[in-house]
Amino acid sequence: MSEWEPKVITFLCNWCSYGAADLAGVSRFQYPANIRIIRLPCTGRMNPKFILAALRHGADGVWVSGCHPGDCHYIEGNFYARRKFALLKTQLEYTGLIEPGRVHFSWISSAEATIFADKARKVVEAIKALGPAQHFIKKQAEVA
Amino acid sequence: MNNPYLPYPVRIDSVITETEDRNLKTFKFIFLNPEDEEKFKYTAGQFAMLSVAGQGEIPIGIASSPTEKGFIKFTVNKVGRVTTFMHNMKAGDIMGVRGPCGNWYPWDILEGKNLVIIGGGFAFTTLRSSIVYMLNPENRSKYGKIDVVYGARHPGLLLYRDELAAWEARDDINMHITVDGTTDPNWKYNVGFVPAITKQKAPSAENSYAIICGPPVMIKFTLPVLTELGFPPERIISSLEMRMKCGIGICGRCNLGTEYVCKDGPVFTLEKLSKLPNEY
Amino acid sequence: MQAYTEKIREAAKRLLAEKKVDVVIGFRKGTMPLMNEPFQARTPEQADLLVWDGNCGINLANYLPKRTEKIAIVAKGCDSRNISIQILENQIKREQLYILGAPCKGMTDKRKIQDELEGKEIFQAEEAGGQVKVSGRDFEKTFNRSEYLQENCAVCLHRNPVISDEMLGEPVQEQQVECYEDIKQIEAMTPEEKRKHFDALIEPCIRCYACRSACPACYCPTCFVDESKPQWVGKTTDPTDTRTFHFLRAFHVAGRCSDCGSCERACPVGIKVRQFTKKLEKEVKELYGYEAGMVQDLRPPLDVYRPDDPEPFL
Amino acid sequence: MSEMFIAKGDFPAIIERLMSRYRVYAPVKNGRYYDFAALKEAGAADLGFKNTRVSPKGVLYPQAERMFEYSLAKDDPEVNIVKETPKDFSPQVILGIRPCDAKGFKLDDANFCSDKFKDPWWAQRREATTLIGLACNTPSSTCFCTTVNTGPFDTTGLDAMLVDTGDGYALQVLTEKGKNVLGIVDLKPAPAQVAGKIEELKAGAEKSIPTAFDPAAIAQKETLEIFNAPFWDEIHFGCLNCGTCTFLCPTCWCFDIQDEVQEGTKGDRLRLWDSCMFSLFTFHGSGHNPRSQKVQRVRQRFMHKLKYYQDKYGTGTACVGCGRCVQACPVNIDIRQVGRILGSGCSCPA
């Protein structure tokens, strides 16, 4: 598996973290190419089903990032998201669906390109350390 | 063992957008294996299960007529998962067709009778099949007078407009095309709801059968008109829609009393329907 | 608790006769030992069929959403908490309801009693005092009800109804119990052990969704398992699909679950599905100090926020 | 046909002999409940059961079954062509099936194999399966098989039947199929007194099952009269539409067909048990739902079992009285009670 590179589905809020990714790009900051970005209007749009869907379809990790609490473009979207994430992460780990370290959350503003690149590296590193995801991938149904 | 669930592979020969809202497209299929066409021998009024690999299957009335050889046609409304997917498919794509399923309009009984065909909206597909079938030179003499009342909300929603115009020009079929309303100053046909136009044209019930297909609300208001014109329930024929999966009377979901709509229907007389639970 | 029977009948007759309500929702005696059937009395005569004992485990709040008539309903602690959630979530209006509060000493777990009988079949069961006497072909046995309660009842902290228009009895004393013992045991496991534990737990699942259907907090117009565009979860008993189902089902009731145990009671194959929901209950309590339905106008935790909410996920 | 005898001590060896030639399904204790499972070792079979939690229909008609497979890869010359999946229809035996469940298979046959269409998977598995039943000496209190035209010693659906006589099993071979399968094991003729013992057990068992309702009375009623009767309001109230009854039932055959795709390049067409209790069951793509209300779905289940099937086939109800739904219903809706109400036409305390 030396050539294995993780796939990390990354949900970024349009107003902050996506801007940070953009800025990181135009600033030519290096960050791993393992992340596959999906733009969301707001982390408040983030549905736990999206994360499960990504993992079911074979993502090795998921990273969700949005505006810092208090800076939401829609005033309070990420405040709601925050509660969902807290419960979701605990429950994912509690039920053993995924190992700790496969699902990441962060708040990154559109100015924080260095932080974005840095976090991207950390996320990919953590997921690499865990190896390929195995247990929660939907395979061909085991049926008669 | 012959597997009734296995679709015949077909190639999409053409896709025609029928209506202005682009929600209805007519798919013309050609069987990949010519011998399958022989096995898929159908009668006007039957339906088939259209199968898209990876999406699922849907029951759709056969719009082509058994007298049209070499292809089969279906007009599909975009509503759910399979139909939406189909609307994005193109000529040349491969999919599947299974059937034919269900019963058909009782052509043996209808011989020598006058026919009043009433259709609304996109429920005109098996009626188109029936009309083409009857107008075929070999068959036309078997039936008496044919009256067709066909309505849509506005002219842009009528199906098969070229054919409607051609039928309009013939003298062996009386077309009564109508729309609920139109802003087209050149509209040369009727304006009004199907029940009203049926009442106005008042086709004779003498030696006649009525076949009616359309949205429930149209059927609800047209049935009293037909009764008024003197059609008894056993001479009013309709076709039901149900959610279906197997299409061959096994999977159970289209069950109505003792009948399976997919196998024992979808064509029922009003008399038969009055004895069945009204869960359709 | 059987003393409630007379009071329920009396109240039902009165409310129906005075036309204060159109129906009274309660239980009637079941055809099976240790079972009662949810029942709605529409006439004072039918009110005489209403009963109450330790076999009223199904959460009656389940029969309320989207109803329009005036309803009297018998509510245990958990039922009343679900009713208040339903009121908050506009499933039913408070004005429509006349709540007959039933302080509760827990519901009998039929399966636990059955387990003690070495496969022998119970023909009859009688409840008296704190005891259940069961009998069958050539046997008779008496159990202390308190030792054979549904697991959720054994660790219930809110036995008294939180809202009511009329109480059927004096409030009972609340229990002082450690209610998260099994959750803590699971928390202490390694990720691998956790996965194995839950895989074994849901292995018998036949995906009938009885747990969802029995849940008084499940009333989404379209359940996620029924969505087809996109389809979030497959419909076979494939392990990943079953895991997804149980995970999302529990997550959907996070902070709205009163731990009434209806899901577990309804499961035809005996899966302890509460192990999913109880953890979320614990987290919600620890993180946000919220317990489902305990305070009338407090919305469920995923519906609200505080600017200084903890961020344990960062 | 002839009556044989197997001493209990010899029984495991007999199962092993059968296993050497056939896939053998037998009741196996799994936690609190019994299930029919393919035996890996003879000792796992446990005939000390009342009945299994889920009916054995899954042996012939699995809860999920791959019907077809296909490729979705663009460069595959056979892309999008749906093809049959190879399947194993080798001979198998269900050992210890109760007479009611075996009778249930016969009722299912009418649905799966009609005059016009044969369900290939059901038909082939059915053909490959030999049913060695086990008579019920001590029926459960929820049993009402005798009401619905079968019984604890009913042999109609079976190829052979075992009767537990205490120290051993008396074995009646009933069909050619049963004879062929059991031909591979050494059997001793039953001692003379066994026949009397069987009669005694049979009489005792039948006597212990009360008549629950009158199917003929339901058959005689007008469909629409009971369909529109007011008692459904009361019958349906407690129902959670959980579908447990339909999943456990030996004669609930309804299924769904679903496509599942793996990695976008290949996929399966699956069929899965479905239930008339679910609102999605009849939900049209257009949004219309002919059975959108709970009361309609509950009515459909009972009407189909107790009325429509009787009217359609004239061979009695689509219920074999196994009592599983009565035992497992979380809200204690009792089909026996419903049968009484349908037959009498009212919900007065019947």
Image: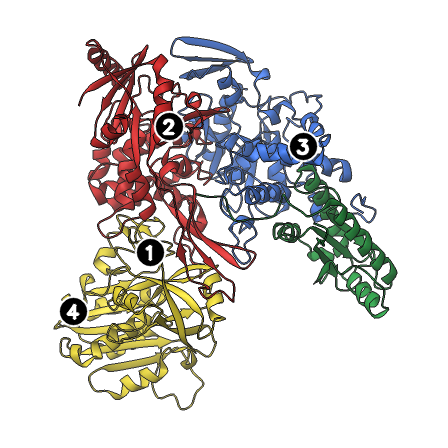
Chain colours: A green, B yellow, C blue, D red
**What residue would you read off at disc 1?**
B247
Say few, some or many: other residues with alpha carbon within 10 Å of mark 2 (under 14 / 14 to 19 / 20 or more).
some
For badge 2, the amino acid type reads Met
The answer for how far apart the CA atoms under marks 4 and 3 are is: 71 Å
Query: Which of the chains bears the disc numbered 1?
Result: B
Q: Are marks 1 and 4 in contact (CB under 8 Å)?
A: no
* Callout 2: SS: helix
Q: Is residue D340 visible?
A: no
**What residue would you read off at disc 2?**
D19
**What residue would you read off at disc 4?**
B110
Q: Can marks 4 and 3 be said to lie on one chain? A: no
Query: Which of the chains bears the disc numbered 2?
Result: D
Q: Is residue B13 visible?
A: yes
* Callout 3: SS: helix
Q: Which residue sits at x=25%, y=29%?
A: D178
For badge 4, the amino acid type reads Leu
Query: Which of the chains bears the disc numbered 3?
Result: C
D314 is higher (above) or lower (below) than D141:
below
User: Residue C30 at what x, y percent from top left?
Assistant: 42, 26
Foreground mark, 2 or 1? 2
Foreground mark, 1 or 4? 1
Q: Can marks 2 and 4 be said to lie on one chain? A: no
The answer for how far apart the CA atoms under marks 3 and 1 are is: 46 Å
D115 is higher (above) or lower (below) than C264:
below
Seen from the viewer's position, the closer of residues C304 and D306 is: D306
A46 is higher (above) or lower (below) than D273:
below
For badge 1, the amino acid type reads Gly
User: Residue A17 at what x, y percent from top left?
Assistant: 79, 61
Residue C193's mark? 3
Q: Can marks 1 and 4 be said to lie on one chain? A: yes
For badge 3, the amino acid type reads Glu
* Callout 1: SS: loop
